[in-house]
Amino acid sequence: MDYPLALALVDFLPVLAMAAGIALLAPFAARTRGRLPGWAALAGGVLVVLGGLLKAVWKLLVAAGGPDVGWLAGVQFYLFGPGFALLAWAVLGRRPPLWGMAGFAAAGVAAALATGATWPLLLVTTVCATILGVRLLLLSRHPAGRALFGFNLLGTYAMGLLASRPEQTIALQWVEETLNTLIWTAFAVAVLRLTRQDVPAGNRSERTGETPSPLQ
């Protein structure tokens, strides 16, 4: 498909919004859950943002008449699954154990490689993104923040339905990119509100005797 250059450039907007939200979420996880969850959130965020960025770069190359480097688009599935698994674990607060979430993501990667299909990674991504969204919604104590997290969560489901349509017209892709930008802008704003609310003393890392995180 020939992508308009404007559409390809818009594809970078949700990536920027996603990066902004995760840049706020990683220090929050470190401050409220501990140093290791903070680093896990940062690592998971890097994987997720990288996946979105590479997909946007691929679309820009195609729109500009450059080479069709297919792996730039396909690799996002292998980055999203582990990335969202790390993010979900980071906000859960060490339960379940890290190896459990890592094993779940690794099983998805192994199944995708064995079958040559992306559905195992889509399953991992959907489950972990749902855990992340629900947990953040519950952590938020402000109705506006909860509404934004809820919109982000439901919007990701809607994006999945739209992206699965066999005929991806240019008009439909404009709808998808607009919705995707709104979804991740809502996420960034909701995380910002979350970081500004008071943190219960029992959740602070210093109460657990952990060394303050450099992510703070």
Image (cartoon, rainbow, N blue to C red):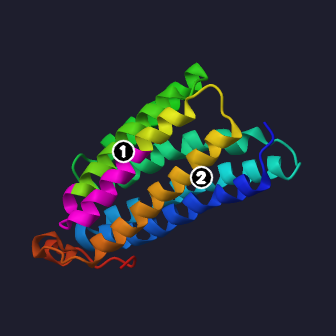
**CA distance for labels 2 and 1:** 19 Å
Q: Is residue 133 left or right of residue 32?
A: right
Q: Is residue 104 left or right of residue 70?
A: left
Vertical comparison of 47 with 143: above or below? above
Q: Is residue 82 visible?
A: yes
Q: Which residue is mark 1?
A: 154
Residue at 35% over, 52% down: 151
Question: What is the total number of numbered labels drawn onto the structure image?
Answer: 2
Disc 1 secondary structure class? helix
How crowded pointer 1 is (Cα within 10 Å; few <14, some 14-19, many 20+) is rated as some
Vertical comparison of 11 with 121: above or below? below
Vertical comparison of 36 with 69: above or below? below
- Image coordinates of residue 113 in percent, x first then y, are 58, 27
Q: Nearer the viewer, mark 2 or mark 1?
A: 1
Residue 26 vs residue 37, the one in the foreground: 26
Q: Which mark is residue 52?
A: 2
Q: Is residue 125 visible?
A: no
Residue at 63% over, 48% down: 174
Residue at 58% over, 24% down: 117
Q: Which amino acid, mark 1?
A: Leu
Is tag 2's residue or tag 1's residue first in the polypeptide sequence? 2
Magenta span covers which residues? 138-155
Residue at 40% over, 38% down: 126
Residue 182 lies in the magenta-colored region: no
Q: Report the quarter where the N terminus lies.
A: top right
Q: Report the quarter where the C terminus lies.
A: bottom left
Residue 48 vs residue 21, the one in the foreground: 21
